[in-house]
């Protein structure tokens, strides 16, 4: 059981950004024979072919073509997302006051802001550089060193903070300090430390991340403590299930999208055409054949679920309180914030039963707003029967989240049945 959780920690530690999550997924896929396809080339596919394709370096779709044609065997899809809430560098990040060199940052997604204070932060993401011949190339970069810190204000200077709650202004209070000196010189040094010639940088997509490594914790290693569990834990489960799967009659697909935390509306996001484009090219036949494939398909949208919190039990619906360690959660919301219905939920419960894994149910309290995920988006885009599921966790969108170690292997086993 803990072996799968330890492997999740290894995956998380290699994935400080969506770009790195894609790189680590590729490494694992290639290790078992998957090979890259490019979207700007012609594709020739046959039964059993194991391929992957990326878009914008931060979204990935991998598939193993089924023994039967997709129009007969359909697709078995696991969807998840590679991005996590965090702080991203502004295009002109050099800033500073009163002798401090600082970085200008934008808030990406629904960050639990206070959790980013007083952490040792590294930098990771993608840099676009102009090569000597004038061409542009993309480089994935990572500074795995305690470079940056968003310092909190001493309690002596704000005595009521514990009673009144911490108010953080996103523009004024989140710029991390990265040194003593001038902002522009500090940013140049940052690129040099990323092994990039500062004079050749033409663009970048960089974010901060917590240097604290993912680890098992609690008594008997009951928990996983890490950043980015939402939703790299599901990317890891999807990838592991696909890597382990044998060829089957259906075409197995994992679709790992960027931009879920900001609404999915991009070329590489779940609301864009990426999955449709790839499935269309796998079917590689007339439109009616594609529609037959869609009708024969099933999608499991995997994103993390809210475990019951012992200190805030009243935030949960009394009959739907997922527990850490008790297996995957089926998420339902009749407003279609989740795509699950009675039939797709039943299909996932059957997969859990086949895998000998317990399964739980979640609905949000009727007087609270419900979050959403890629399930309803892909369902509405493609018309594929979809269920929303996820492993239970706490501290969602904190810089340091937690989930259950035993649940990691259970989700992989359930997804494995989907691919069987
Ligand atoms: Zn999220």
Image (tube, rainbow, N blue to C red):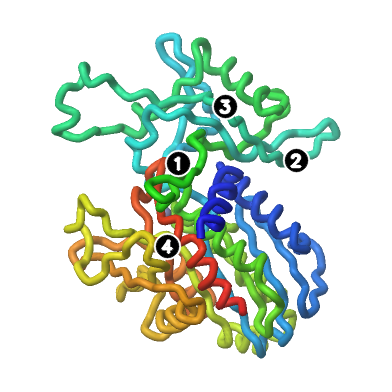
Label 1 SS: strand
The circle drawn on residue 353 is none
Distance from disc 4 to disc 1, alpha carbons, whole Å, reads 21 Å
Q: Earlier in the sequence, mark 2 or mark 4?
A: 2
In front: mark 1 or mark 2? 1
Q: How crowded is mark 1: few (under 14 residues within 10 Å), some or many (20 or more)?
A: many
Name the side, left or right, on which 207 lies relative to 193. Answer: left
Q: According to the image, label 4 marks what residue?
A: 391
**Residue at x 61%, y 89% (from the top left corner):** 292
Percent of width and height locating residue 167: 25, 33
Q: Earlier in the sequence, mark 4 or mark 1?
A: 1
The circle drawn on residue 137 is 2
Label 4 SS: loop
Q: According to the image, label 1 marks what residue?
A: 86
The quadrant the C terminus occupies is bottom right
**Residue at x 50%, y 70% (from the top left corner):** 378
In front: mark 2 or mark 4? 4
**Residue most toward the right?**
133
Q: Which of marks 3 and 1 is nearer the N terminus?
A: 1
Circles 4, 1 touching at the beta carbon (< 8 Å): no
Write down the quadrant of residue 190 in the picture: top right
The circle drawn on residue 145 is 3
Distance from disc 2 to disc 3, alpha carbons, whole Å, reads 25 Å
Q: In this view, does 331 lie above or below 194?
A: below
- Foreground pick, 105 / 116: 116
């Amino acid at each position: 059981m803990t072996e799968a959780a330890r492997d999740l920690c290894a995956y998380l530690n290699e994935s400080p950004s969506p770009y790195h999550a894609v790189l680590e997924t590729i490494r694992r896929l290639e290790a078992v024979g998957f090979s890259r396809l490019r979207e700007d080339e012609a594709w020739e596919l046959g039964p059993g072919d194991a391929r992957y394709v990326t878009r914008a370096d931060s979204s990935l779709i991998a598939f193993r073509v089924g023994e039967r044609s997709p129009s007969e065997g359909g697709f078995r899809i696991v969807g998840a997302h590679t991005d996590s809430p965090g702080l991203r560098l502004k295009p002109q990040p050099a800033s500073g006051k009163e002798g401090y060199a600082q970085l200008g940052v934008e808030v990406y997604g629904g960050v639990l802001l206070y959790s980013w204070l007083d952490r040792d932060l590294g930098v990771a993401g993608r840099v676009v550089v102009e090569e000597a011949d004038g061409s542009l190339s993309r480089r994935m970069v990572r500074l795995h060193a305690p470079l940056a810190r968003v310092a909190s204000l001493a309690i002596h200077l704000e005595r009521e903070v514990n009673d009144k709650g911490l108010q953080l202004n996103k523009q004024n209070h989140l710029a991390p300090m990265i040194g003593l000196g001038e902002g522009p010189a500090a940013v140049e040094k940052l690129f040099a430390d990323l092994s990039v010639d500062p004079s050749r940088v033409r663009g970048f997509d960089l974010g901060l991340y917590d240097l604290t490594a993912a680890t098992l914790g609690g008594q008997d290693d009951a928990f996983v403590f890490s950043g980015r569990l939402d939703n790299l834990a599901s990317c890891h489960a999807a990838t592991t299930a696909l890597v382990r799967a044998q060829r089957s009659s259906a075409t197995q697909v994992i679709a790992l999208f960027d931009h879920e935390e900001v609404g999915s509306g991009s070329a590489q996001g779940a609301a864009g055409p990426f999955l449709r484009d790839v499935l269309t090219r796998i079917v590689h036949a007339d439109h009616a054949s594609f529609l037959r494939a869609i009708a024969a398909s099933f999608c499991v949208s995997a994103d993390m679920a809210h475990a019951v919190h012992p200190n805030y039990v009243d935030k949960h619906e009394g009959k739907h309180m997922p527990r850490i360690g008790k297996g995957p959660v089926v998420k339902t919301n009749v407003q279609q914030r989740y795509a699950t219905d009675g039939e797709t939920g039943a299909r996932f419960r059957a997969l859990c039963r086949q895998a000998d894994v317990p399964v739980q149910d979640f609905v949000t309290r009727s007087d609270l707003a419900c979050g959403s995920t890629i399930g309803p988006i892909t369902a509405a885009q493609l018309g594929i029967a979809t269920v929303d599921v996820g492993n239970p966790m706490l501290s969602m969108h904190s810089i340091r989240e937690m989930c259950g170690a035993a649940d990691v292997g259970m989700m992989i086993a359930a997804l494995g049945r989907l691919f069987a």
